Amino acid sequence: LKLPAAWTGVGSDLSLHRSTHSHQQRQAMATHRAADVASEPFTTIMIRNIPRMYVAPQVARELRRFFAPTDFDFVYLPWDKTSTTNMGFGFVNFRNPFVARVSLARLADQPWRYAKYYRKM
């Protein structure tokens, strides 16, 4: 099963390049990836590397650093059934495809502000 490119969301392959690319190069790759999916209308993105102790309202709080609260309407974090943490990834639904597309570049390589966590969005 091949998923549409838009479903890979933020950070789909950034973790493979962390040691070899600068911040500016990663931003450019994310912008290029956003341009690649410009022809595909989508409103939902996947965010990886979410701190395990976060709950959905904390992810929404992080997103409000970059977007108006009315830009997105749904945050989902799958929960690990064997522990008391999320699974480290989640989904955000934006209200329109343009904002979802812009979010790919805007969120790329951003640090998590409300947790001491070394991985980035």
Image (tube, rainbow, N blue to C red):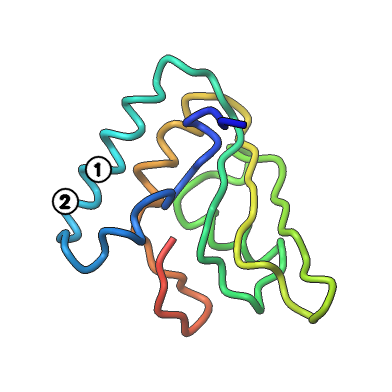
100 lies above or below 23: above
- Which mark is on residue 25? 2
What residue is shown at x 43% (from left), y 49% (from top)? Answer: 12
51 vs 103, left or right, is: right
- Which mark is on residue 2? none
Disc 2 crowd rating (10 Å Cα; few below 14, some 14-19, many 20+) is few
What residue is shown at x 83% (from left), y 78% (from top)? Answer: 82
97 vs 92, left or right, is: left
Q: What element carries label 2?
A: helix
104 vs 94, left or right, is: left
Residue 53: % across, % down: 66, 79
Inter-mark Cα distance, 1 to 2: 6 Å
Marks 1,2: beta carbons within 8 A: yes
The foreground one among 12 and 95 is 12
Disc 1 crowd rating (10 Å Cα; few below 14, some 14-19, many 20+) is some
The residue type indicated by label 1 comes to Met
On-image quarter of the N terminus: top right
Give the residue at mark 1. Answer: 29
Residue 39: % across, % down: 42, 14
